[in-house]
């Protein structure tokens, strides 16, 4: 029986979590945990597709776990785990590598963005990571994946892989997983450049507000955020032509749980200095308690490790049963 309401989503321990990760993903996880059976993982094997300092990786993995819990994900009701601890993900990824067509991966725009001009010199893992992502999702037969806008194309690839596997082997094992992309924070942009996604891997710390920033740091970063010299836009058409203004208004609307239209209306014609102060107030109000809780949880490694250990055991049971079915279907003999 395929579970009909199961979620899988992951966050990389590739740096400090930022507002994009919170508004595009984690805030939605918190809402969805009531309706779905949820598997949330820290995807360390994705993080190492670009260089990670071995001294920091374990610590960052704990930080993502702490951020999940501090944001309101209940570790008792959901399965929280570390991707690398469940080897079935990589086992299924290899099988999917043999199903995925090279042309499909060649179309992935995130690879092009991340590889930049140095395409010949990036890791093979960075190129093939969407295949591992498909395995992360389908090893649990997940039906839905809450993600930010930037992951939409990888979710389409996941569906293509599921469909081709099902067709090739005449099975209906894998569901055609749907992305869940909602709210006004599905694509938070850099505070230094409104045309670039806010990212953990951006070299400038002023490009992003981190979940563990202090209130002073948040105020400073919003004050310094790039804007244009005009007052705030008074209609949606004007706003969409001004990427930095649009981004700050989107963040404002996401934190106030209002539409972007209402945010534009409420702030039309204001000076950026006044708006930025209001924005900083709401971001601090929402983020400061999370930041405090992350710091508290980070003092208790034993607790965080025990959460991940419990999650791993639950995840392995589910993942192993699906992998066994896959082996049966493709004719791999188990001992
Ligand atoms: P990296 O730069 O290392 O890829 P990242 O900041 O993109 O890191 P991920 O761990 O890759 O973070 O993504 C975790 C989740 O956060 C995904 O669901 C992704 O879609 C979402 N996300 C990442 N950046 C943004 C953003 N700027 N706006 C909205 N959602 C985002
Ligand atoms: Mg990313």
Image (tube, rainbow, N blue to C red):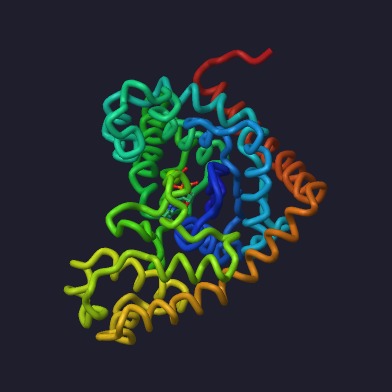
Figure quadrant of residue 163: top left
Q: Position of residue 25 (x, y in %)?
A: 49, 57
Please tell me which residue lies in front, 323 or 283.
283
Whether residue 175 appears in this view of the structure is yes
> Residue 198, located in which quarter of the rendered image?
bottom left
Q: Is residue 95 left or right of residue 102?
A: right
Name the quadrant of the C terminus. top right
Across and down, in percent, residue 212 comes to 60, 60
Residue 286, given in percent of the width and then of the height, sits at 56, 73
Vertical relation: 228 (above or below) 322: below
> Does residue 200 appear to the left or right of 78 in the view shown?
left
Residue at 64 percent across and 61 percent down: it is 73
Q: Quadrant of ligand 2?
A: top left
Q: Residue at x 18, y 74 (%)?
A: 238
Residue 224 in percent (x, y) is at 39, 66
User: Residue 52 or 125: which is nearer the viewer?
Assistant: 52
Q: Quadrant of residue 324?
A: top right
């Amino acid at each position: 029986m395929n579970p009909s309401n199961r979620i899988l989503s992951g966050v990389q321990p590739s740096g400090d979590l930022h507002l994009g990760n919170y508004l595009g993903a984690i805030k939605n996880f918190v809402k969805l945990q009531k309706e779905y059976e949820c598997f949330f993982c820290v995807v360390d094997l994705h993080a190492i597709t670009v260089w990670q300092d071995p001294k920091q990786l374990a610590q960052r993995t704990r930080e993502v776990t702490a951020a999940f819990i501090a944001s309101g994900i209940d570790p008792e009701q959901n399965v929280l785990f570390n991707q690398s601890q469940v080897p079935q993900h990589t086992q299924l990824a290899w099988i999917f590598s043999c199903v995925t067509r090279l042309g499909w991966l060649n179309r992935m725009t995130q690879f092009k963005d991340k590889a930049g001009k140095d395409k010949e010199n990036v890791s093979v893992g960075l190129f093939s990571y969407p295949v591992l992502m498909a395995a992360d999702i389908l090893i649990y037969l997940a039906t839905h994946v809450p993600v930010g806008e930037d992951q939409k194309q990888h979710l389409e690839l996941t569906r293509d892989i599921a469909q081709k596997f099902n067709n090739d082997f005449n099975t209906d094992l894998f569901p055609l997983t749907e992305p869940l992309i909602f709210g006004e924070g599905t694509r938070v942009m850099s505070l230094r450049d409104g045309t670039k996604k806010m990212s953990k891997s951006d070299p400038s710390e002023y490009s992003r507000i981190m979940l563990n920033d202090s209130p002073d740091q948040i105020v400073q970063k919003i004050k310094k955020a790039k804007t244009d010299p005009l007052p705030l836009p008074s209609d949606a058409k004007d706003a969409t032509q001004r990427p930095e203004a649009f981004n700050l208004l989107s963040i404002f609307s996401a934190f106030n749980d209002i539409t972007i239209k209402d945010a534009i209306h409420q702030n039309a014609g204001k000076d950026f200095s006044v708006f930025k102060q209001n924005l900083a107030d709401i971001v601090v109000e929402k983020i400061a308690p999370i930041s405090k809780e992350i710091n508290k949880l980070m003092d208790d490694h034993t607790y965080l490790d025990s959460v991940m250990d419990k999650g791993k055991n639950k995840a392995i049971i589910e993942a192993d049963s699906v992998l066994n079915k896959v082996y049966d279907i493709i004719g791999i003999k188990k001992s």
